Image (cartoon, rainbow, N blue to C red):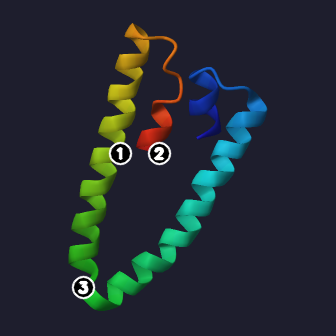
Amino acid sequence: TGTLMTMTGYSAENAVWINAAVAGFNFLFAFVGVYLMDRLGRREVTLYSLGGITASLGMIALSFVIMEIHSHWNALPIVGL
């Protein structure tokens, strides 16, 4: 995540903070995943996760395309993370 944010124009210090925020969300939502695993089962959680990953990567890819057109929108890739 840090390299990705540096590529978008953020400073190295800001990229580290963004990386820490993403790691924090991953930590918190790991507990949500464990809870849902017990409630829904592995197959459903895996399928929903794949859908979320696909949507997130699509948003990041689209944000880089938009940034090529509008270079001042450098906060856009954070939405996909």
Secondary element type, mark 1:
helix
The amino acid beneath tag 1 is Ser
Q: CA distance from mark 3 to mark 1?
A: 22 Å
Check residue 40 in the rendering and tell me which mark sits there, or answer none: 3
Where is mark 2, residue-wise? 81
Position of residue 12 in the picture relative to residue 28 (left or right):
right
Q: Which mark is residue 68?
A: none
Q: Quadrant of residue 61?
A: top left
* Structural crowding at the residue carrying mark 1, measured as other residues with C-alpha within 10 Å and reported as few (<14), some (14–19) or many (≥20): some
The residue sitting at 27% across, 58% down in the picture is: 50
The vertical placement of 23 against 6, above or below, is: below
Q: Residues within 10 Å of mark 2 (few under 14, many from 20)?
A: some
Question: Gap in Å between the C-alphas at discs 1 and 2?
Answer: 6 Å
The image's mark for residue 56 is 1
- The amino acid type found where label 3 is placed reads Leu
Residue 32 sits above or below residue 25 on the image: below
Query: Residue 44: which quarter of the image?
Result: bottom left
State the image coordinates of residue 71 (x, y, percent, origin top left): 49, 11
Labels 1 & 2 near each other (Cβ < 8 A): yes
Residue 66 percent coordinates (x, y): 36, 18
Q: Specify the amino acid type for callout 2.
A: Leu
Q: Give percent across and percent down for residue 74.
A: 53, 23
Instruction: Tell whether 76 sits left or right of 62.
Output: right
**Location of residue 38 with respect to 68 vertically, above or below:** below
The mark that comes first in sequence, 3 or 2, is: 3
Q: Quadrant of residue 56?
A: top left
Query: Residue at coordinates 44% horizontally, 77% vertically from top-left?
Result: 32
Q: Secondary structure at mark 3?
A: helix
Mark with earlier residue (1, 2): 1
| Label 2: element kind | loop
